[in-house]
Image: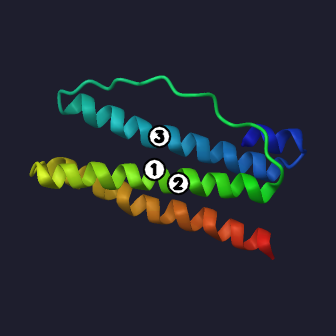
Amino acid sequence: MAAYFERASLDGFAQWMHLQSVEEHQHAMKFYKYLNDRGGVARLPSIEAPRWEYDSVREVFEASLAQEHTVTEHIYRLYKVAQEESDFATVSFLKWFVDEQVEEEKTVSDMIDKLKM
């Protein structure tokens, strides 16, 4: 997404997406560290290449919001399993991510609303 904005000379949007990328990496590392701290193994599956072509700025942010919704869904599933397994440490760990996703979705939704204006 940042690359799309850079090619379109939309430097502010590109910078925002780069910052989001750094933040998402930090979130991933929280999971990595938590798994290692609990004696687990952090295995990273292969992922498909990210999309890099879009038709508009708004489409980029709509795709970003869709990604946030998917992340939220995955966190909720993990949270539910942790509750069912009475894994209270993991419930506590995941609570931060549940709260963070509210902020993440709102930030992108607000951007889309501004773009609609």
Q: Which residue is mark 2?
A: 68
Q: Is residue 22 left or right of residue 46?
A: right
Q: Locate the C terminus and report the quarter of the image it occupies.
A: bottom right
Label number found at residue 110: none
Contact, CB < 8 Å: mark 3 with mark 1? no
Label 3 or label 2, whichever comes before in sequence order = 3
Query: Is 14 or 1 nearer to us in this picture?
Result: 1
Q: Position of residue 42 (x, y in %)?
A: 32, 26
Contact, CB < 8 Å: mark 2 with mark 1? yes
State the SS at label 2. Answer: helix
Query: Residue at the location (21% across, 27% down)?
Result: 40
Identify whether 93 is placed above or below 105.
above
Q: Is residue 17 left or right of residue 82?
A: right
Q: Position of residue 56 (x, y in %)?
A: 83, 54
Q: Distance of mark 2 from mark 1, alpha carbons?
A: 5 Å
Q: Position of residue 65 (x, y in %)?
A: 60, 57
Query: Is 108 or 80 nearer to us in this picture?
Result: 80
Identify whether 115 is placed above or below 94.
below
State the SS at label 3. Answer: helix
Q: Which residue is mark 3?
A: 26
Say which of marks 3 and 2 sits in front.
2
The quarter holding residue 52 reads: top right
Is the residue marked by circle 2 packed among few (<14), some (14-19), or many (20+) residues within 10 Å?
Answer: some
Query: Residue at the location (70% across, 73% down)?
Result: 113
Q: Position of residue 83 (x, y in %)?
A: 16, 55
Q: Distance of mark 3 from mark 1, alpha carbons?
A: 14 Å
Q: Residue furthest left?
A: 86
Q: Locate the N terminus and report the quarter of the image it occupies.
A: top right
> For the residue marked with disc 3, what is the amino acid?
Gln
Q: Is residue 91 left or right of residue 29?
A: left
Label number found at residue 71: 1
